[in-house]
Structure formats: C-alpha cells, structure tokens
Image: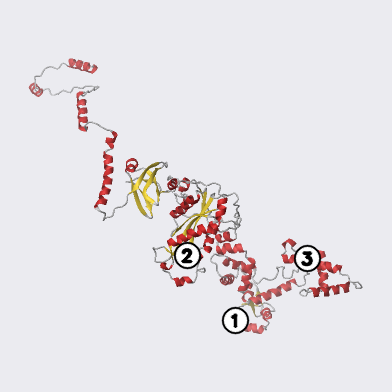
Amino acid sequence: MEYLTVKEYAELRGCTERYIRKLIDEDKLMVEESWGNRGNKGLNYQIPLASIEPELQAKYRRIQSRKENAGKPKGRKPILLPDVEQMAQSEREEIVFWQNILTEWKNYKPPGKNRKEATDDFVLYLREKYPDITFSERILYRKDKALREHGPAALVDRRGKHGKHKKAVPDKVFDVFEYFYLDQSRKSIQLCITLTELEIRQHPDKYDQSLLPLASQASFVREVERSIPVPVLKYFRLGEKAFKDECGNYIERSYDDLHSNDIWVCDNHTFDVFVNNGESEKPVRVYLTGFLDVRSRKMVGWYVTDAPSSDATLQALRRGIAAYGIPKRIYSDNGREFLTHDIGGRGFRKSAKTDEHEPPTILQHLQIEFRTALVKNARAKIIERAFLEIKESFSKLFEGYTGGNILERPERLKAIGKKADNFIILDDFSRYVDTFLTGWFNKQNHSGTGMNGKSRDEVYAACLYEQRLATPEELNLMMMRTTRMQTVNRGVKIKFYDEDIRFYSDELIMQHDHEKVYVRYNPDDLAQVRIYDEQDRFLCTAKQQPKLSYFASKDEVGERMRENRLLEKTVRAYKKQKGIEADDELELIMRKAESNMAAGERLDPKIITPIRAVDDNYEADVLAAAVGGTIEPIDWTEALERMEKAKKE
C-alpha cells in the first residue's frame, strides 16, 4: 500500500501542513502513526493513498509519472497509417481533395513572381474558393511533405482519430459494467453503474480505487453504443432466439426448382381480433390453422377454430386436398397438433423404450412426406410472413382488433367493453376469413423471390406440374383418425373430447375378443368404426354403442336387450352351424365302462409267496369250519404247474 507524508498531502490539496495536522487531531483524516529514528525523532503520520479523494489520487499519479519520465529522451514514434481500403468514404474524398490542391499548387506559376509570392497568391485564392477551410503556406508544405514521405493516407487529418484519448469509462470499469449489463434480466444502465461502483468499492484488493468516482450515465451510454456489438447485445439481453431471428445469417432459397403442391407448410396463427363464439360471456380470440403452398405462397387450406388441435389440422388439410390435390411434402413446426401419433407420427417425442406397434399415420396413407422445423427456428417457415400480412390487411379492419401486444391495443376497446355481444359472431368471422383468403389474399401480386410480381393464384396455376387426386370415398378412408393399440374387451372404445365412446359388433366379439387391435374412425361420423389387427389387416366394422340414460324408455331398454340376446343366440347356434352331433354323454361313459369290465383284470407278479399259519395247536376242525370244508393235504406241486401253464397262455 502506498502512503503520503503530511507535506505531500498538503501540496496536493494546496494547503498548509498545519491544516492537515488539525484534520488529523480532529479524526477527520485516516492516518497511520510511526515513531521516527535518529535525526527525525518524534511522532510521524502516514496517510494511505487509497483513503484520500479519488481526484487527488489521480493528481498524485500524474505528478509521479512526470517525475519518472523527466530527463528521458523523447523518441519520435513511427506513423502508423491505415490502408486506404480501410478508410471511410469521407476520408478517401479528403485524400482526393488534397491531391488535387497540391497538383494545382505545383502547376500554379504566375509570370513575374517567385515561388514565395506565387504561394502567397495561391493561398489567397484557396481562402476565397473554400472559405470554410483553413489554408496557409505552412499547411501546403506540410501536406506535400506528408504525401512524399508516407503516401496518400497521410493527407487525412488524423487529429482526434488516433483512439489514444483517455476514456471517460476505463476498460476495467467497463468490463465490470458489462458483467451486469449483458444479462437477460435487462437491468438499466443506471442500475448497472451502481452495481459496478459497489463491486469496485467492496474489492479494494482487486480494483484500484482511483477508478472511482465513475463517469456519468451519458458516458456509459456512449460506451455501450460504441463498444458492445449489436449481436452481443441481442444474444445476452434478448436471448438466443432474438439473436438468431435478427442477427443470424439468412439463408435465401431458390424457388425455381419447385412446383406447386411439392411442399405445403402449416402452422397456427392467433387472430388479433375479439369475437363472440356464442358460448362465453366474454369475447375470445380465435385461431387460424393454415396450409400454404411454398412455391406460390398461396393459402390452400385453412380452418378457423377457438382452440388449435389435431382435428383442426385435419380439417384444414382436408379442405386443401379437396380443392387442390394431395401435396408431396408437408413442413410444420413441432406442435402437438401436428406430431400426433396418427397424423404425422410422434417424431422426437416417440420413446425408444416402447415396442408398441405404430399403425400407419394419415400422412403415410396419403403418401405425404412429413418434415418438422428445427426447434426455435420458426423463422424458416414462410407462412409466418403470410400471417403478418393477414394481420395487417385483415385483422386491423375489425372494431375488435386487439393488437399483438399491450402497446398495439387500440384505446377504443375500453369503450366497447368486455361483453361478447359487442363483437362479431364466430360464424360470420369465419365466412369473412374464407372470403378474404380466397378473393383477396391469394389474388394479390407478390414481390417475393420467384414470384415475378404475379399473384399467388397465377403462380400456383403456372407452376402446377403434377396434381395427385383421390376420390371422396378414398379420401375419407385415408384420412380416418387412428387410436393406439387396445385389447378387445366387450368391444372397443375411442376417446373423443375426453369422453369414452364404445363400439361393438357380434363379429368383433366372436372372432377377436381379447386380441390386440386398433380403431380407425371419422370424427365427423362416429356411427361406426373400422377395426384392424397388429399387421394392419382389416378385420371388421363396429357400430357405436351409446350409453343409456337412467330415465331411458322401456322401448330403448328393450332394444338394447334384443341386441344382447342376438349375441347369445349366435353363440347358441355355434355348434349347430358347425353341424356337430354326438351321443349322450352318460351313455358314452357307461358303454366304455362295461367294455373295460369285460376285458377282465390280469395280474402278472414276478414272485408268489404262500403264507401259512404257524400254530401247531390250531385245531383242524376250526380251520375246516373257517374255509367251509375239511382239511385235506395240499399238493403244491400240482398248483405250481397250473400257474406256469396259465402264465404261458
């Protein structure tokens, strides 16, 4: 740490040492005490340089710098001139101006006058011709010498352009300022200046306190405009998307190699208009789901809805296909209404862990290649520009125009109020949209790339090379919605607007109960659905089985019971339809039992062991009585022979 003596500090302040000592005695000045040695005895005071006023610190450093540089030879620094190509147009014009002046001066030789007199006359001539420019003999000789020694670039007046002036905001200070300012919280310049000052004051070991006090807010504003590139400001204060949209490189595409219906791009647009949807007491803003042909920029299919959904997407696509044919490709963003499993597939949302069978999507049935935009890259879709034109040319025509944000909102909305009855009805608004897009938007001349000033309709017709068509029946079949795989359990069901609707048929129950199937259906006609197996094979159709109310009539209940009995009758007739006939079950069992008894039972022991009584006192008459006869001797030899004979037989 650097210290000042009382004398040095008094010289800086321009006062006496006595006054400084008075400030020390009154504790108005920070000092460190020390005792002198040898000849300089007594109490001495040292004043820390960092504790005095910032302007005095700067003054002290200037004095020290002059002392250090005193006596050093001042060498001439080489002149570093920029290349002519790096100069501004005004600087190049200044070079040409002085070259012409010097050439004219050298050629100026009035008769009877020497060089000095001719130069004086030429200077007077220049002052009359260019009264706003200072001319003198010395300036002419200096410019001529600069041209000869350093070339044309030396003719430019470089005063104030060397960039070596002392900055009002030092680089170290501005680095701290940028840390706070380049943030998406978008802090004000004044707040960032305050934070910068606090940071410097609280870290004296890191920052030289002579940097304080800071410059004015105007100085920081100028430094921001001069030093921070616009892309850096966009990226750090507004975010990556703003940087890409406003500063990123724009890739211009050629449309000459495209034909109509090659690519349709689709997206949703929120109308900046309040409408009455007939359901809410308050007005609502509705949406446009649109398909735009890339080659012609023609709006080919659209649908107005109060909530974007996959059904609205299909409605817009169906209208476009019915009017102009099936496109080869569709390009969209990553919205859920497009990345539905049965329309365009789940895309990046599809889980790699599941092995569930994925039925063909609607776009696959239509043989349409489907692409999605990069995330946060909506600017790649030209339909965004079409939506902006719709806002400017259509939405602003309505009394209920709301503006895209609070700053654009017309003041008249306060007078109209917030009741839906004060705004246009949704059905009428939809008809206006149809008329505007068909009769105005598509017929306006377009100045975009490849349009040649023609209307969208004209370019579409001129560039239509191939039109892929389908009959209404085939189109209805290909554009059916598809459920996920489900197990047949007393029929099948689909979820429609958060409600389960069940479908049933005798064939489905009899032939495919508890099998895995998926269902295809038309949202506009839910009377029946089509059933497919895991190999995408058509199985059968099933009709809707609506729920019965608790207050259903006797006839309604009877009709449902007749349907149930029909299945029972079908089941009962199963064996008869097969022609199956057989004897009575009991008779079959008894007949087999008698056959088994008649065959007898044969035993074939390997060893026969006779067992006899061993009591010698056992009375013979008792044994005889027990076996029903008298006791006679047993001939075992004869018995064994008979057994061997029977075994051979």
Question: How packed is label 1: few (under 14 Cα within 10 Å), some, or many (20 or more)?
Answer: few
Q: Amino acid at mark 2?
A: Val
Query: Would residue 467 be seen by someone viewing this image from the given angle?
Result: yes
Q: Which residue is mark 1?
A: 28
| Residue 177 point in image, percent of width and height | 59, 68
Q: Where is the C terminus found, in terms of image quarters?
A: top left
Q: Amino acid at mark 1?
A: Lys
Q: Is residue 501 above or below residue 606?
A: below
Question: Which of the 4 image quarters holds residue 42?
Answer: bottom right
Earlier-in-chain disc, 2 versus 3: 3
Secondary element type, mark 3? helix
Earlier-in-chain disc, 1 versus 3: 1
Q: Which residue is mark 2?
A: 273
Q: Is residue 158 left or right of residue 251?
A: right
Q: CA distance from mark 2 to mark 3?
A: 59 Å
Query: Would residue 378 be seen by someone viewing this image from the given angle?
Result: no
Secondary element type, mark 2? strand
Assess whether mark 3 and mark 1 are in contact (beta carbons under 8 angstroms). Answer: no
Q: Which mark is residue 406?
A: none
Q: Which mark is residue 96?
A: 3
Secondary element type, mark 1? loop
Q: Is residue 245 above or below residue 415?
A: above
Task: From the viewer's side, name the closer residue of 132 and 569.
Answer: 569
Q: Residue at x 73, y 67 (%)?
A: 90
